[in-house]
């Protein structure tokens, strides 16, 4: 009897595993098709200063799947990383972002806007990454100093000297670096100190409960103090309320990104948002 149940249990587990595996396989197959059929889009999320003026944007990829609808990057980026498809996907993101940067650069109203691009660890570790960035900047004509690469702490787990050497090469070209989701990973302060960084980006999980959770408030204050001590700029992501913004601002973080200002939106809408802010003398919130 027990043996029977065990066997059934095992079979049940097997078929669930099997379902998960084929769901992944089919999503991966779709991802290959998506690259060929140009099913990706970039959305832009504004980054602002204390006055609410636009400093730039972060580009966030969207997958418009013909049957599934919009697939979240949280779902397909990990799969793209495991399958290696993150390399062509990431190349497309970089190319599209640099092209946009050049367009903004050539317009008096947008010429100083920066663009932040997420770079997965696997992408950064590829041997040709520096060359790819160089070529993409050259062919687009974008100003490297307006490009910011968002890296995550997972990059710092292996071959740190190699990573630093690569960062330095890119840094020499004028590119800026931010550590995304800061505080959620494993980076040691020893490493952070050695990296040619420009910015720490406080993870939204700390910002979310900043008003109610003393620990989160303390962590945020510590990250801000650390940024100051290391001479780094600091930005908070996931800012949704005026209270959160006021707290951050009064504790020394003067750059923000979050739904309070705008969700990530398609380019056409983003440009309308910029124009509206300009016409209205930079209102702070939506
Ligand atoms: P991330 O880089 O940390 O981006 C922030 C995420 O928080 C975005 O989710 C954004 O839409 C969301 N967000 C922004 N403001 C708020 C807010 O006020 N409240 C809340 N609740 N959420 C907010 P999204 O667009 O779904 O992206 C998820 C993650 O996928 C990104 O996290 C990033 O790690 C990854 N990703 C997105 N685009 C790319 C890409 O082009 N390349 C790579 N390698 N990864 C990407
Ligand atoms: Mg990011
Ligand atoms: Mg983040
Ligand atoms: Mg995040």
Image (spheres, rainbow, N blue to C red):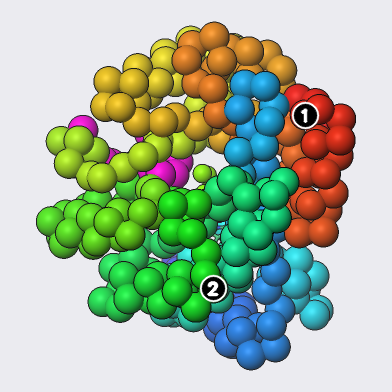
Tell me where residue 191 sits by quadrant: top left
The residue that label 1 is drawn on is 282
- Tell me if I can see residue 88 in this picture: yes
Give the answer, above or below, for where 17 lies relative to 187: below
For marks 1 and 2, give the CA distance.
Answer: 29 Å
Give the answer, above or below, for where 277 lies relative to 175: above
Secondary structure found at label 1: loop
Q: Position of residue 166 (x, y in %)?
A: 23, 62
Give the answer, above or below, for where 255 lies relative to 107: above
The residue that label 2 is drawn on is 140
- The residue depicted at 50 percent of the width and 52 percent of the height is 146
Q: Is residue 187 magenta?
A: yes
Q: Position of residue 170 (x, y in %)?
A: 31, 60
- The residue depicted at 63 percent of the width and 13 percent of the height is 246
Q: Earlier in the sequence, mark 1 or mark 2?
A: 2
Q: Is residue 118 magenta?
A: no
Secondary structure found at label 2: helix
- The residue depicted at 64 percent of the width and 90 percent of the height is 36
Rate crowding at label 2 as few (under 14), some (14 to 19) or many (20 or more) other CA atoms within 10 Å.
some
Q: Which contiguous range is marked in magenta?
A: 178-189
Q: Position of residue 169 (x, y in %)?
A: 24, 61
- Tell me if I can see residue 61 in this picture: no
- The residue depicted at 70 percent of the width and 69 percent of the height is 41
Q: Is residue 6 left or right of residue 189?
A: right
């Amino acid at each position: 009897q027990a043996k029977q149940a065990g066997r059934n249990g095992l079979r049940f587990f097997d078929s669930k595993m099997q379902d998960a595996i084929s769901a992944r396989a089919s999503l991966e197959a779709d991802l290959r098709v998506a690259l060929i059929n140009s099913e990706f889009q970039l959305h832009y999320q504004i980054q602002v200063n204390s006055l609410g003026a636009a400093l730039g944007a972060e580009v966030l990829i969207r997958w418009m799947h013909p049957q599934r609808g919009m697939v979240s990057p949280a779902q397909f980026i990990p799969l793209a990383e495991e399958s290696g498809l993150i390399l062509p996907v990431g190349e497309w993101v970089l190319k599209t972002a640099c092209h946009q940067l050049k367009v903004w650069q050539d317009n008096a109203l947008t010429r100083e806007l920066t663009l932040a691009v997420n770079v997965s660890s696997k992408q950064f570790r590829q041997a040709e990454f520096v060359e790819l960035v160089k070529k993409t900047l050259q062919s687009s004509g974008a100003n490297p100093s307006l490009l910011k690469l968002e890296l995550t702490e997972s990059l710092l787990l292996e071959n740190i000297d190699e990573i630093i050497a690569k960062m330095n090469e890119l840094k020499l070209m004028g590119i800026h670096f931010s550590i995304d989701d800061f505080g959620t990973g494993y980076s040691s302060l020893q490493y952070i100190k050695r990296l040619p960084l420009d910015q720490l980006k406080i993870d939204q999980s700390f910002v979310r409960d900043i008003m109610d959770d003393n620990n989160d408030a303390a962590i945020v204050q510590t990250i801000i103090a650390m940024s100051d001590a290391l001479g780094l700029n600091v930005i908070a992501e996931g800012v949704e309320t005026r209270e959160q913004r006021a707290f951050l601002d009064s504790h020394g973080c003067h750059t923000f990104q979050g739904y309070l200002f705008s969700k990530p939106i398609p380019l056409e809408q983003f440009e309308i948002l910029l124009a509206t802010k300009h016409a209205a003398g930079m209102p702070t919130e939506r």
